[in-house]
Image (cartoon, helix red, strand yellow):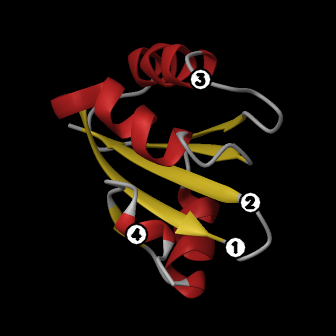
Amino acid sequence: MPSIDDVTDAPDELSDEEAEALLEEADLVQDMMGEMCPYPQVEAKKGLQQIDPGELLVQETDHVPCTENVPKAVGDDAKAQVWRSGDATYRIYLRKR
């Protein structure tokens, strides 16, 4: 049976422990639950404009394509990592470069 990794090109995935620790240090958290692309991509770009290099933007989403589309949309402006909860909740961690 194929897994989600077979059909997506998502960034590196974080463990539960890493994800929680990074969430606590986030400089900006965006709630994108219920939102579909391209809105989260646009908001990620706006969010990165609000923070300084080295700071962390976290987007929480329930829309799987965001885990691939948001990192692609921000390109080289941020290093992206993803966390999957196992219950259809995802976080995209964007460290501004």
Distance of label 4 from label 1 (alpha carbons): 15 Å
Query: Going 55% across and 59% down the picture, which residue do you hit?
Result: 25
Distance of label 4 from label 2 (alpha carbons): 16 Å
* Labels 3 & 1 near each other (Cβ < 8 A): no
Q: Does label 3 or label 2 sit earlier along the sequence? A: 3
Distance of label 4 from label 3 (alpha carbons): 19 Å
Distance of label 3 from label 1 (alpha carbons): 20 Å
Secondary structure at numbered mark 4 = helix
Closer-to-camera residue (37/21)? 37
Q: Is residue 65 above or below residue 83?
A: above
The quadrant in which residue 97 appears is: top left
Residue placed under numbered mark 4 in the picture? 5
Q: Does label 4 or label 1 sit earlier along the sequence? A: 4
The quadrant in which residue 45 appears is: top left
Q: Which mark is residue 85?
A: 1
Nearest to viewer (mark 4 / mark 1): 4
Q: Which mark is residue 89?
A: 2
Nearest to viewer (mark 3 / mark 2): 3
Secondary structure at numbered mark 1 = loop
Say few, some or many: other residues with alpha carbon within 10 Å of mark 2 (under 14 / 14 to 19 / 20 or more).
some
Residue placed under numbered mark 3 in the picture? 37
Query: Going 50% across and 79% down the picture, which residue do you hit?
Result: 18
What's the amino acid at mark 2?
Thr
Query: Going 35% across and 39% down the picture, which residue do you hit?
Result: 71
